[in-house]
Image (cartoon, rainbow, N blue to C red):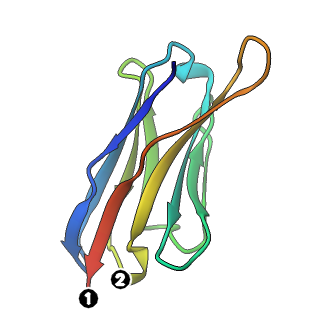
Amino acid sequence: QVQLVESGGGLVQAGGSLRLSCAASTNIFSISAINWHRQAPGKQLELVAGIVPGGNTNYADSVKGRFTISRDNAKKTAYLQMNSLKFEDTAVYYCNLKGPGSLKPLEVWGQGTLVTVSS
């Protein structure tokens, strides 16, 4: 069973930085798209950033220029570097993998990691 394990969340002051990690237990990591989503209290799930196997990335307007998504296929790990954090970045951050499956496309979610930004 494919698992994603996020880490790196915590409490940080506004203006600070955190790096989230998403470790995958699958050999299809390198041919899968990885996305980071977040859900703030009382709000809907929001796509924050994504990276495809070829390395192209996309970002929500709210994080462009501050967040950077990357991947290390050898380590089967994706990262979300978050700089210049704002109070409104406070949320549970989830890693999501989308890749090919034997019968149907595979989609897996991590358990989430909490990021709290103090103002």
Which quadrant of the figure has residue 13?
A: bottom left
Mark 2 falls on what kind of element?
A: helix
Rendered location of residue 9, percent (x, y): 28, 56
Q: Residues within 10 Å of mark 2 (few under 14, many from 20)?
A: some
- Circle nearer the N terminus (1, 2): 2
Is 102 or 69 nearer to us in this picture? 102
Q: Residue furthest right?
A: 103
Count of labels shown? 2
The one nearer the camera, 102 or 61, is 102
Judge left or right: residue 24 versus residue 54. Answer: left
Q: Is residue 86 above or below residue 70?
A: below
The answer to whether 106 appears left or right of 63 in the picture is right
Q: Is residue 42 left or right of residue 22?
A: right
Residue 114, above or below 87: above
Q: Residue at x 49, y 17 (%)?
A: 26
Task: Residue at 42% x, 81% y: name it.
Answer: 88
CB under 8 Å between discs 1 and 2: yes
Q: Which residue is denoted by mark 1 in the rendering?
A: 119
- Residue 63 lies, with reference to residue 56, above or below; the image says below
Image position, residue 64 (x, y; %): 53, 67
For badge 1, the amino acid type reads Ser
Circle 1: element type: loop
Q: Residue at x 60, y 71 (%)?
A: 61
Q: Amino acid under label 2? A: Phe
Q: On the image, numbered disc 2 is attached to which residue?
A: 87
Spot occupied by residue 42 in the image (x, y as percentages of width and height): 53, 80
Give me the C-alpha separation between circle 1 and circle 2: 6 Å
